[in-house]
Amino acid sequence: MPTGLKRDLGLPAVVAISIGAMVGSGIFILPALAYEIAGSTVVLAYLLAGLLVVPAALSKSEMATAMPEDGGTYVYIERGMGPLMGTIAGIGTWFSLSFKGALALVGGVPYLVFALGRDLSSGTVTAIALGLAVVLILVNLLGSDVTGRFQVAIVAVMLAAMTWFVAGSGFAVEGSRLSGAFDPGTPGLLVATGAVFVSYAGVTKIASVAEEIENPSRNIPLGMMLSLGFTTLLYVLLVAILVGVTPGDVLTATDAPVAVAAEETLGALGVAAVVAAALLALVSTANAGVLSASRYPFAMARDNLVPAAFERLDPRFNTPSRAVTLTGAVILVLIAFVPILQIAKLASAFQILVFVLVNLAVIGFREGAVEGYDPDFVAPLYPWLQVAGIVGGFVLLFTIGTIPLVGAVLITAGSMVWYYVYARSRIDREGVVRTSARKNVGDRAIEETEALFDSEEPFDVLVAITEDTSPAMKRELVRTASDIGRLRKTAISVVEFVDVPQQMFAETHPSVSRENPEWLNAVRADGGTPGTDIDVQYRRIESEHSAQSMVDYATYEDHDLLVMERDRADFHTRLFGKGSDWILENAPCDVLLVDEGPDPASKDRPGVNDASEVAVVANRGPYDPVKLLLADSIAEEAGAGIHLLQAVPADAPETRRQTIEAYHDRLISTLTVPTRSTVIETDDEITGLTRFVGDAELLVTGVDRTGLTARLFGRPGNRLVDSVDANAVMVKSHGDRNPGLLQRFLMDHVFG
């Protein structure tokens, strides 16, 4: 059985397929509809639409030379953005190409009716369209080499007739009818541009058969740009002549506008030539649609997104016969039962979305520095070209109307249902852009961690205690802050915040005392603040609102880290946003909460700083550098090891696990104590992490969320600490308190 498709489509066939996919309904059906929207400015609408296609054409050329495989848009988006987006692009584009092919066949029949000079019943029109569709299906079953030669012949005859029409009708153009043809301020210009945009969608369809193109690095981009430039010029000339020789009321009332114009200027022979060209053009559009559309299920089957039957090649003709047959069946059903013009308009909205995704995919490939992405052709003017294509696409999408937009949403939703019901359980991969984004996030985290470990800048720490802080906890807080001094030059401010009753005539500023208490001297005496490089200062501040005073003091003194006790019994204050929750949300620096476990009074349990193993959990995305600095400092002082723990979903792709393991390996080389790591695959993050924390005496984790939802449902970090029988240190990064939408997405769905 054949193992691959033959590369037998040269540059002429590439250009012919692309032109044939464009020159059809775009000139023979749509001009009259667009004229009714924008008048003579329809000429500018065609030019503007052609220009807006350029970014997608160049972007798709770049990706096609990097991945010359059948499937085109689907392949690029699936490889870059993952199988879900690939499924949406593949199914949606397959449907839209099928819709356009059926529209072209139905749209050609009015020209036949015009030539015959009599009306035909709707049944006869449908029968003719069905007959043409069957012929094209058979042609595509015979092989792409036959298809390519057939396409070249059709396009050659069609272009000859169109050249005659332009040359023979140009003299009859009335300048007054073209008044305002290039006026950008004409109302309805963008609406008309959106309506005719689908005329150029075929320019990128040659990428759908990239696996069958000779010398793809040259012929794909050259073929796209040659066909786009030629077709844009042809459209502008033809539409200008149509508008210039045909009265407006006549143009908007006919289903065969080019034939009507030819009747005015070329006579019976010219009408015959135009009708022949129209039929050939529309048949060539349908032929290119069958050819390109059938390659989408073929490519998707190779990736297990649709049944494997669509991947099989015919042993005699070496074509994806089942994919061609399915595509043909869809076209036949559409011709027979569906108002195809309306559905084609809906499908054009999805084509715009696909072009937006194509431009986004190039940005993703380049910014992600994707390994193995080495295109022979590189799109110029990056990234401005892609940004222009994205913005232009959305402008057009929102000007063509609500119904087409809703239709695109429905196609997208149906594709997503198919993916989750059928495909998701059959694949174990993700897009390379997402993998690269995860790697880049990890690389940035490594750089931040190394910079924190290597920095010679003093690290200012505020140890905040209250009258309710136990002597043992005071000692642990000071020792925890002091441990950082083993890796960074550290200055420690121990501040005891004392609440005093509100007094109507009291001074407005807090009362401050600097005399060291006995407990702090005792901590120093027993080695709680080792080393002579650590500067420890004590203050006692009396105020009416200790939480507010903590935040104000940390802000005024420009501290880098606030160390305080975590109260396990403060659900009421957390619920109403006071106490530690308020401090977490308003502190100007990183916050470290120390928790002595469920039984702090036990004499047998080691202290926070006496652990033999420190378990460090990554809660959202990569590890917070302060979390690693603290864990490494405590472990070094205690002679302990570190166990890095990170949870991923049970069905996570293997690439996700591999990237995180590589990130852990780099962290291990940065840390100063013996370190091991475990990536946990689990559907229940808390249960999975709790099991692997095991016998560690100290858990270092994070505080992921603040706000009402965190107060009502608990933070992952809080729930994990409450689930283990160990001391804990929880780190809340100041820089991660209010992450943007993109950062939250990367942390929640890309890295961890």
Image (tube, helix red, strand yellow):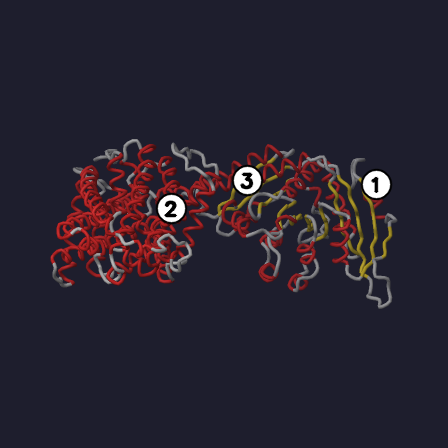
- Classify residue 654 as left or right of residue 36: right
Q: Which residue is mark 3?
A: 442
SS for dot 3 = helix
Spot the residue most to the bottom: 504
Question: Residue flagged by tag 3: what amino acid is it?
Answer: Gly
First in sequence, mark 2 or 1: give its number.
2
Quarter of the N terminus within the rendering: top left
Q: Is residue 405 visible?
A: yes
Q: Is residue 330 visible?
A: no
Q: CA distance from mark 2 to mark 3?
A: 39 Å
* Residue in the foreground of this view, choosing between 96 and 498: 96
Instruction: State the mark number for residue 372.
Output: none
Q: Where is residue 43 drawn, in percent x and y?
A: 33, 52
Q: Quadrant of residue 705?
A: bottom right
Q: Which residue is mark 2?
A: 51
Q: CA distance from mark 2 to mark 1?
A: 78 Å
- Classify residue 187 as left or right of residue 468: left
Q: Quadrant of residue 673?
A: top right
Q: Which residue is mark 1?
A: 525
How packed mark 1 is, by other alpha carbons closer than 10 Å (few <14, some 14-19, many 20 or more), is few
Q: Where is residue 460 drawn, in percent x and y?
A: 75, 43
First in sequence, mark 3 or 1: give its number.
3
SS for dot 2 = helix
Q: Where is residue 270 drawn, in percent x and y?
A: 16, 50
Spot the residue most to the right: 515
* Residue in the foreground of this view, choosing between 680 and 589: 589
Question: Residue flagged by tag 2: what amino acid is it?
Answer: Leu
